[in-house]
Image (spheres, rainbow, N blue to C red):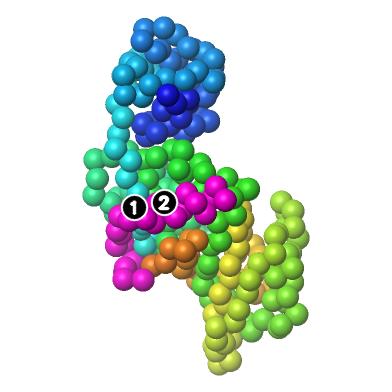
Amino acid sequence: MERLQKVIAQSGITSRRKAEQLIVDGKVLVNGKKITELGTKVDPNHDKIIVEGVPLEKEEPVYYLLYKPTGVISSVNDEHNRKVVTDFIETDKRIFPVGRLDYDTSGLILLTNDGDFANLLMHPKHKVVKTYIAKVEGIPLRESLKKLERGVMLEDGKTAPAQVKVKRSDKKKGTSIVEISIHEGRNRQVRRMFDAIGHPVVKLKREQYGFLHLKGLNAGEYRELKPHEIKQLRELVVT
Ligand code: URA
């Protein structure tokens, strides 16, 4: 037996939070009876669940790792018809991205139809470390990088400690390549952090998400996660 909101989220039609709202709003029937109690347990294989008049089909969960190119929206559709991350993946499942990368950021992004799994990974308390390679303007002083390591004050508060390493600097062009690892996921966080120390980002790529990396993929390519990787990601966030 599992909680009703979890079963709805796992079907891929919506997030756990929205499923809870649908239940509270009286939009969910279980075996013909309206259920508005959030803790209600159901048997996903035998109970007949209807959400907003549509019977719930349990979709087999799928998990993908995409090397998102720049110029792509981290969404399932775009009102201006720009390319979205789901355009790159061949599937008939209702997948969506786990979190987001900016339109102008490339790199590793996960996609799934498993709403619970996505929520688990995105929850701020779980601290999945994400590593970015940033090309920045100028050659940051050690003291400036220390500020990033300790945390810098942004409009939405001080950032948590980060790990920062200069990979190389090009004195002629006046640019540097910096690797930065953070576990928060605020909007445009890396760009804002480098703005805060006076070294705006020119180019940004997410190279790692937890233990996952982009090796073997070119921009626009994807692969399915392996069962042991899915297990390891779950372990990463529950421990
Ligand atoms: N930080 C950013 O500034 N942009 C991203 O896309 C991800 C992290």
Q: Amino acid at mark 2?
A: Lys
Cβ of mark 2 under 8 A from ligand 1? no
**Residue 75 appears left or right of 60:** right
Of 117 and 184, nearer the camera is 117
**Residue 145: image location, x then y, percent:** 69, 76
User: For numbered disc 1, what is the local secondary structure?
Assistant: helix
> How many numbered tags mark residues here?
2
Q: Quadrant of ligand 1?
A: bottom right
Q: Which mark is residue 231?
A: 2
Image quadrant where residue 30 sits: top left
Q: Is 174 rendered above or below residue 51? A: below
Q: Is 67 rendered above or below residue 238? A: below
**Residue 97: image location, x then y, percent:** 42, 48
Residue 129 makes an appearance in the image: yes
Residue 13 within the segment the image draws in magenta: no
Q: Amino acid at mark 1?
A: Pro
Q: Is 186 rendered above or below residue 41? A: below
Asked if disc 1 and disc 2 are in contact, CB closer than 8 Å, the reply is yes
Image quadrant where residue 13 sits: top left
For the residues labelled 1 and 2, the Cα–Cα distance comes to: 6 Å
